[in-house]
Amino acid sequence: MKRDLPSDEALEEARVLFAALADRTRLRILHALLLAEELCVCDVAHVLGMSVAAASHHLRKLRHLGILKLRNDGRMAYYALRDRFAADLATHAVRQAAA
């Protein structure tokens, strides 16, 4: 049974993921990207009612964790989900809490 437990490295990666998802703003960003598929930083800021700098900070954190991918188009930076796992997990958790 002990050998079937996850490695310390895998547990640490999961802990970092859950810590990032424990932020309301990041949960909102994931939900917005589920709906829109791709958004520029200024659109995320507008939708969430925050500054571009604050939106950029949260988007960068999610990208560094491998949750989001970045596409540059000239001076514009567009973000999209790398895959739906984290966003689906967050959406499921929010729905369970609301039930």
Image (cartoon, grey):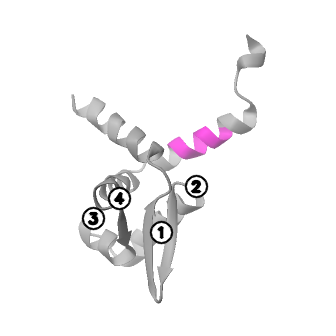
Q: Quadrant of residue 66?
A: bottom right
Say if mark 4 contacts mark 3, CB within 8 Å.
no
Q: Position of residue 31 (x, y in %)?
A: 32, 52
Mark 4 sits on what residue?
A: 33
Tell which of 71 and 32 is nearer to you. Answer: 71
Q: Position of residue 39 (x, y in %)?
A: 35, 69
**In percent of the image, x 29 and y 30: which residue is there?**
96
Q: Is residue 53 left or right of residue 98?
A: right
**How many numbered circles does the render carry?**
4
Magenta stretch, main secondary structure class: helix
> Crowdedness of circle 2 by 10 Å Cα count: few (<14), some, many (20+)?
some
> Crowdedness of circle 1 by 10 Å Cα count: few (<14), some, many (20+)?
few
In the rendered image, the vertical position of residue 17 relative to residue 7, given as above or below: below
Q: Earlier in the sequence, mark 1 or mark 4?
A: 4
Tell which of 1 and 24 is nearer to you. Answer: 1
User: Farthest residue in the right direction?
Assistant: 3
Q: Earlier in the sequence, mark 4 or mark 2?
A: 4
Comparing marks 2 and 1, which lies closer to the viewer? 2
Q: Position of residue 57 (x, y in %)?
A: 48, 69
Q: Which residues are magenta?
A: 12-18
Say if mark 3 contacts mark 1, CB within 8 Å.
no
> Crowdedness of circle 4 by 10 Å Cα count: few (<14), some, many (20+)?
some
Q: Earlier in the sequence, mark 2 or mark 1?
A: 1
Mark 1 sits on what residue?
A: 57
**In percent of the image, x 76 and y 14: which residue is there?**
2
Quadrant placement of the C terminus: top left
Mark 2 sits on what residue?
A: 65
Q: Is residue 85 magenta?
A: no
